[in-house]
Image (spheres, rainbow, N blue to C red):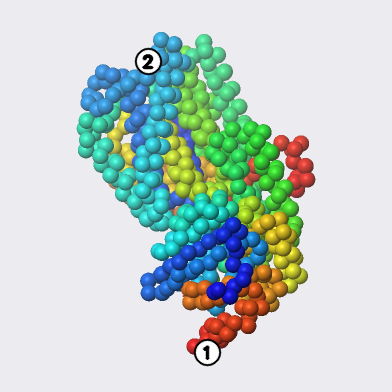
Amino acid sequence: MAVADFLITLVTFIAIYSLFGIGLNLKFGFTGLIDFGHVAYFMVGAYVTVVLTLPADAPTYGGIGGFDLPGLFAALGPLGSLFGWVLGVLGGMIAAALVSLAVGVPTLRLREDYLAITALGIATILNTVVKDEDWLFNGPYGISGVHKPLVDVFPISLGSFTVNMAVFGLLSVAIFGYVAYWLVNRFRDAGRTGRILMVASVGLVSVWYFVMPVVDGGGTVELTKNVLWLFDPTAGPNGGLDYDRFVLLLSLGFLAGGYHWVERTINSPYGRVLRAIREDEDVPQALGKETFQYKMQALMFGSALAGAAGALWAVNIGFVSPDQFASTITFFAFTAVIIGGTANNKGVILGTAVFWAIRNGTRFIDVPSQYSIQLAAARLILIGVILMVILYYRPEGLLGEQDYDIDLPTSLRGGSDDV
Amino acid sequence: MSEDSLVPSPEETILEVDGVEKHFGGITALDGVNLSVGPGITGLIGPNGAGKTTFFNCLTGFYTPEVGSIRFEGTDITGARPPAVAQQGMVRTFQIPRELSEMTVLENLLLAPPDQTGERLSGAWVRGDQFVEDELDVRERALEMADFFELDHLLDEPAGNLSGGQRKLLELARALLTDPEMVLLDEPLAGVNPTLEEKILERIHELEEQGYTFLFVEHDIDVIMEHCERVVVLHRGEVLTSGTPEEVQSDERVIEAYLGEVDV
Ligand SMILES: Nc1ncnc2c1ncn2[C@@H]1O[C@H](COP(=O)(O)OP(=O)(O)OP(=O)(O)O)[C@@H](O)[C@H]1O
Ligand SMILES: [Mg+2]
C-alpha cells in the first residue's frame, strides 16, 4: 500500500473520530457532563442510518428494515439517492438524540460521578441488547452491504489520464500549499515549545511522506503518488478520484459542519450558560436559568454529532457489528479530548490526530513479526505515557481552553468595542 | 411578636413565610420560622449558626423545607426549583461568593440578565436582529454595573483572579442584573472597604426607592441600625423578635442570644 493510501485511511479515521470527539467535548468540555456512554450514540447513529438506507431485501439481514431511503429517491438520479442517504444520517442523528433524551431524564439529576457510571452502564446494556436481539439489527452477525452514498459515480474520471492527473494533481498540490500556509501561520503564533514541537512533528512527517519513499527504492513513482495524493492512477481505465478519497472528503465536510455548528452554539449567550453550568451549576440556577434543560440539550446535541460520526463510520468500513462499539471508543475519545485541550474544539481535532497517528501510524515501524503483539501493547503504553506527561505538565491539554467571542456587527458595537 | 408595629399589612406583604422547618440529620436548622416581609430594607440578624443562610436556601429553592409554606407576591413557591424562584423575581447572593472562576468578570455579569434571545438554542443558531440587539443591550447594562462596582478595569480578567472583596462585589452586581423585585443579601459587605460599602448602601437605598425589596443579613450592628427600617432576629432556627432597630437592640432576649452564644 502506498503511503498516500495509508494517510487517506488515517485522516478519514481522524475526521470521523474528531466529529465524535467534538460531540463529547460539547458535553464534557463545555457543559461538564461526564458521559462515559458516548459510544452508545455512535452505535445508534451508525445502526439507524444503515437500516434506514439498507435495501428491503438485503441478503443475510434478518432485522428491522431496511427502509431503502436512497432507493426511494433514486429516480432523481445520483443526487436523489445521495439525498436519501442524508435523510438516513439525519434519522440516525435524531435517533441518537432521542436515546440520549431517554438516558438523560433519569441520570442528569444525578451528581456528576454517578452520571458517568450510569451512562457507562447504559451504554454497555444497549450494546448487549443489539448483540443479543437478532430480530432488532441482526444481532452479532452485524450488517454488511452498508449503503455507500454515490458509490456508483466513482471513480470520477474527467477525461484522459493526463487530464485526470493534471486536475486532481493540481488540487492535491493546492491543498498541500494551503496546509503549509496554515502551518506557517500557526508557527508564527506559537510559543517556543510550540515551535519546537511543530518543527519536530512536521519535519518527521515530511521526511516519512516525501523522502522515505524515494530512499526505500520506490523511486519517483511512489513520490508522485504521495504528492498527487488525490489522484489514483489505478482507479478506472484513465485513473481518477476513487471512492476512498471521496469518503475522506465527505468526512472532512461533516467534520467542518459539526465544528462550525458547535462553535456557533458555544460562542453565544447560550454557550455562556453551558460554561456556567460546568463551573458551578448553582450559580446559573440562582440567576434563573433552567439548567436542566440546557444540560439535556447539550447531551442531545452532542449525541446527535456522535450519531453522525457513526453514520460515516459505517460508510467507511462498509460493515457494522456490535463489537465495533465497545466502551474503549468512549475512553479513546476522552483521551483525545484531554490531550488536545478540554473545551477546545481545535484541540479535539489535534488530540484525535495525535492519538490515532500514534495508534495506527506506528504500524510502519519495521519490527520482526514475532514482536507485533509487543508493539501493539507498546502503542498503548506510549499513549498512556503521553497522557500522563500532558496531564502533569499541561493539565489543560496541548491547546488549553479556547477563547470565546460573540460576533456582533462592529458598526453597532458602539462604546463596547474595548470588550 | 405583637410588639412589632412594622409587620406589613396583608396588602403590603411581599414575602410570607409560615412555619418553615428544616433539619439536617439531628440538627434543627429552622424550627418553624414565621415572617412577613414588606417593601423596603429588612435586616436579618442572629448569631452564627442561627439559620440565616439556611433560611435563604429554603426561600430560593436550594433546600426544600420539610414543613411550612412560603408565598412570594401571592404565589406559593414552597418547594419550587431555584430557577423558578429567580424568574419570579426573588434572587439571592451567596454568603461565600460563587464566582465562575474560569469565565471572565464580564461573562459572569453577562450571564445574569433574563430572557436573552441568544440564550435559547434557536436564538444562538439563527442570530437575527433580536440576538444582536439583546446582546448589545445586555453588554451595556453589564458595563454600567461593572462601572458602579469598580470592576470595570477587570472585565477581561478571569473571575478566579479577583480578590475576596471583589468577588463579593461581583456576586452582588450579578444578582442585581437579573431585574429582581426582591434581593436576599447574605452578608454582602463582609470584606468590602468602607468607601465602597457606603456606595453600595447608597445604591441599595436608591433601588429601594425604585420599589425593590431587600432582606439583608449583616453582622455589623451599626450598619443594620442605620440602614434598615425593620430588623428580624433569628435565633436557633426561630424568629426571636422583630421591630425597629431601636426596639430590637434594647430587647433583653436579643442581648442574651448573642451573649449566651459567647458564654457557651
Ligand atoms: N448542608 C448542611 N448540612 C448540615 N448542616 C447544615 C447545613 N447547612 C447548615 N447546617 C447547619 O444549620 C445551622 C444553621 O446554619 P446557617 O448556615 O443557616 O447559619 P447562619 O445563620 O447563616 O450562620 P452564619 O452567620 O455563621 O453565616 C448550623 O448549625 C449549621 O451547622
Ligand atoms: Mg450564613
Q: Do circles 1 and 2 both sit on a common chain?
A: no
Residue at image mark 2: A72
Quadrant of image for the N terminus of chain A: top left
- Marks 1 and 2, how far apart at CA: 86 Å
Which of the chains bears the disc numbered 2?
Answer: A
The answer to whether any part of residue B175 appears in the image is yes
Q: Mark 2: which amino acid?
A: Leu
* B219 relative to A7, above or below: below
Q: Mark 1: which amino acid?
A: Asp
Q: Residue at x 58, y 37 (%)?
A: B123
- The image position of residue B209, as x and y in percent, is 72, 59
The front one of B209 and A218 is B209
Q: Residue at x 41, y 20 (%)?
A: A84
* B181 relative to A410, above or below: below
- The image position of residue A44, as x and y in percent, is 35, 35
Which SS class for mark 1?
helix
The front one of B222 and A347 is B222
* B86 relative to A268, above or below: below
Which SS class for mark 2?
helix
Query: Dot 1: few (<14), some (14–19), or many (≥20) neighbours within 10 Å?
Result: few
Q: Residue at x 37, y 74 (%)?
A: B26
- The image position of residue B38, as x and y in percent, is 61, 62
Which of the chains bears the disc numbered 1?
Answer: B
- The image position of residue B224, as x and y in percent, is 66, 73
Farthest residue, direction bottom = B263
Residue at image mark 1: B263
Number of marks present in the image shown? 2
Query: Dot 2: few (<14), some (14–19), or many (≥20) neighbours within 10 Å?
Result: some
